[in-house]
Image (cartoon, rainbow, N blue to C red):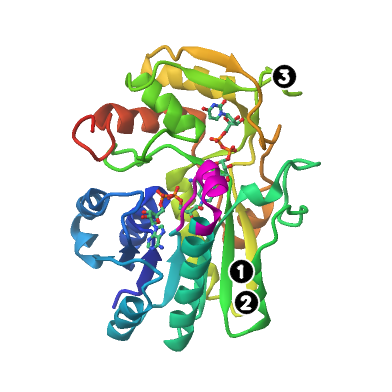
Amino acid sequence: MSRSILVTGGAGYIGSHTVLQLLLGGYKAVVVDKLDNSSEIAIKRVQELAGEHGSNLTFHEIDLRDKPALEKLFASEKFEAVIHVAGLKAVGESVKKPLLYYDNNLIGMIVLLEVMAAHGCKKLVFSSSATVYGWPKVVPCTEESPISATNPYGRTKSDSTWKIILLRYFNPVGAHPSGHIGEDPRGIPNNLIPFIQQVAVGRRPALTVYGTDYKTTDGTGVRDYIHVVDLADGHIAALKKLADPSVGCEVYNLGSGKGTSVLEMVAAFEKASGKKIPLVMADRRPGDAEIVYAETEKAERELNWKAKYGIQEFCRDQWNWASKNPYGYEPQAP
Ligand code: NAD
Ligand code: WQD
């Protein structure tokens, strides 16, 4: 009998790729998503891509804060573990609407943990972020590097019956190589690659490069980009690790361990797409760090997981998704 995993936010960018890898790995996946920044079309495409495993995916349009709905779901099915990916993630919007973010992300998490505990499901993989490292004084960032945002989730560690893995994602990019699922942000993209993609398909005139005077090889910011399929596989590795009796609450970086500058990324995308990306050089974006990349040794050693794909594959797959779906899951310009 296949083991059932609940994936919150499973219709979104990272969630949809993770659900596909789960299905292909022989798991049953149950997705809860309120379709806030995503489309049910992603779920249908994941089902298609999973072939004979597609029937092992079920979808429920539920807001995590809707406790009775979540209770009903847990009463109807036993979950081996939960992969909690649901969340609002636009940094700029969170500054403008902090209460919306606290309400959605924190209350959603609390309700989820309460319902899990009530139903005896105490294994959790949670999407954390390299953003917790802020502007690191030393790179690469290890899991022990100082964090500039405290993480209340880790406090559940005090209850030793819980098993929790916090995955600190670096910068997820790319798309499934089929080009059928990928990132489809609503509104103006905040992140570099979705913005480049929209310039390449003609939706925006130019990329604004934020900062050309950083102490890096070409003056632009350096990040650790990781292919979303590698990232999805990292969740399967984490699930397997949850079976280890020694796990209480563990943190793992999921990155490639390599730093890439904005201009290097632009050049690689131009090569993969054959499109020229016009640039507008601008000041630094407030709050941005200079160089951030991961130490990946802990995940390699303890999760037996390592990123397989590099910059050429990110750009190839991103362009494949973009050229097949210039308006994301919408058939045409809204
Ligand atoms: P995404 O917006 O594509 O997916 C998030 C999904 O969660 C969406 O489908 C949305 O509808 C759903 N959701 C949000 N609030 C919900 C709620 N209350 N109830 C039910 N569903 C809800 O984002 P993503 O890029 O896939 O990111 C997934 C997670 O990873 C987020 O928690 C984000 O903070 C974290 N993360 C993302 C990045 C990144 O750069 N993409 C980096 C680090 C961490
Ligand atoms: C990458 C580089 C920019 C856009 C953000 C969040 C973080 C995490 C991942 C969720 C930087 C430059 C960008 C543009 C540019 N998300 N850039 N022009 O800043 O590393 O992290 O996403 O947890 O919380 O803060 O990613 O893709 O926004 O930027 O020049 O239009 O590209 O300055 O150097 P970042 P990013």
- Local SS, label 3: loop
Asked if residue 12 lies left or right of residue 324, the reply is right
Residue drawn at point x = 50 percent, y = 62 percent:
105
Q: Magenta span covers which residues? A: 87-99
Mark 2 to mark 3: distance in Å? 42 Å
**On the image, numbered disc 2 is attached to which residue?**
156
Asked if residue 294 lies left or right of residue 20, the reply is right
**On the image, numbered disc 3 is attached to which residue?**
213
- Local SS, label 1: helix
Front in this rendered view, residue 313 or 36 = 36
Quadrant in the picture for residue 118: bottom left
Q: Rate crowding at label 1 as few (under 14), some (14 to 19) or many (20 or more) other CA atoms within 10 Å.
A: some
- Local SS, label 2: helix
Mark 1 to mark 2: distance in Å? 6 Å
Q: Are marks 1 and 2 in contact (CB under 8 Å)?
A: yes
Q: How many marks?
A: 3
Residue drawn at point x = 48 percent, y = 59 percent:
235
Q: Considering the image in quadrants, where does the C terminus appear?
A: top left
The answer to whether mark 3 is within 8 Å of ligand 2 is no
**For residue 192, above or below residue 10:** above
102 inside magenta stretch: no
Q: Rate crowding at label 2 as few (under 14), some (14 to 19) or many (20 or more) other CA atoms within 10 Å.
A: some
Q: Tell me which amino acid carries mark 2.
A: Thr
Residue drawn at point x = 59 percent, y = 15 percent:
281
Q: Position of residue 295 (x, y in %)?
A: 69, 47
Front in this rendered view, residue 278 or 247 = 278
**On the image, numbered disc 1 is attached to which residue?**
153
